[in-house]
Image: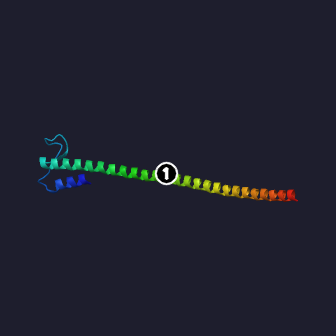
Amino acid sequence: MITSLSFSNAFANNEAAEYIQKDTKAPYDGILLPIEKAVELRKNIIELQTLKAINESYKRSIQMYGETIQLGDQKYNVLLKETNNLSSALSDARKSNDLQKMLWFGLGVLASGFAFYGAKKVTQ
């Protein structure tokens, strides 16, 4: 697009460009430009190539940023899953620990009951 604009700017003024045919002294069909217009056109082409390279670099940066976000999301999901697993394991351990405490308490009550019963029988 910039190149076509450059060509149209160069050819907008008939004095800035001359058309030549194959049979003239020029070795090929084309457009003869003054040095100033040729230099300007070359600068525009270099600028266009530079802008195209910058655009490609931005596209790649955006793509890499998206990939980085995707990897971050994957890490987050893995950490969340592991945290949930650890939380469930801790909760199960606490429940089983509570059951063990109640079991030992019950056994203690039974043992105490048998001890009192045995002491009562011995003293009689």
In the shown orientation, is residue 98 left or right of residue 55?
Answer: right
**Residue nearest the observer in this picture, 74 or 28:** 74
Q: Count the marks: how many?
A: 1
Residue that lies at the very extreme toward the right in this rendered image: 124
Query: Of residues 63 and 11, which is closer to you in this image?
Result: 63
Kindly give the residue lying farthest to the top in the view shown: 27
In which quarter of the view is residue 102 placed? Answer: bottom right
For the C terminus, the image quarter is bottom right
> Image check: 107 left or right of 6?
right
Identity of the residue drawn at 86% across and 58% down: 123
Answer whether residue 69 is visible to the viewer in this image.
yes
Across and down, in percent, residue 50 comes to 26, 48
Q: Would residue 97 appear left or right of 82 to someone viewing this image?
A: right
Say which quarter of the image contains residue 118: bottom right
The colour style of the image is rainbow
Work out which residue is located at the far front of the displayed protein and give it.
Answer: 123
Q: Position of residue 19 (x, y in %)?
A: 16, 49
Q: Secondary structure at mark 1?
A: helix
Q: Is residue 19 visible?
A: no
Q: Residues within 10 Å of mark 1 (few under 14, many from 20)?
A: few
Identify residue type, mark 1. Lys
| Nearest the eye: 124 or 103 | 124
Query: Split into 4 quadrants, where in the image is the N terminus?
Result: bottom left
The residue labelled by disc 1 is 75
Q: Nearer the viewer, residue 94 or 20?
A: 94
Residue drawn at 46 percent across, 52 percent down: 72
Point out residue 2 in the picture as x, y percentages from the top left corner: 24, 54
Instruction: Residue 92: give x, y in percent of width and height.
Output: 64, 55
Residue sitting at x 17%, y 40%: 27
- Residue drawn at (33%, 51%) of the image: 58
Left or right for 86, reference 112 = left
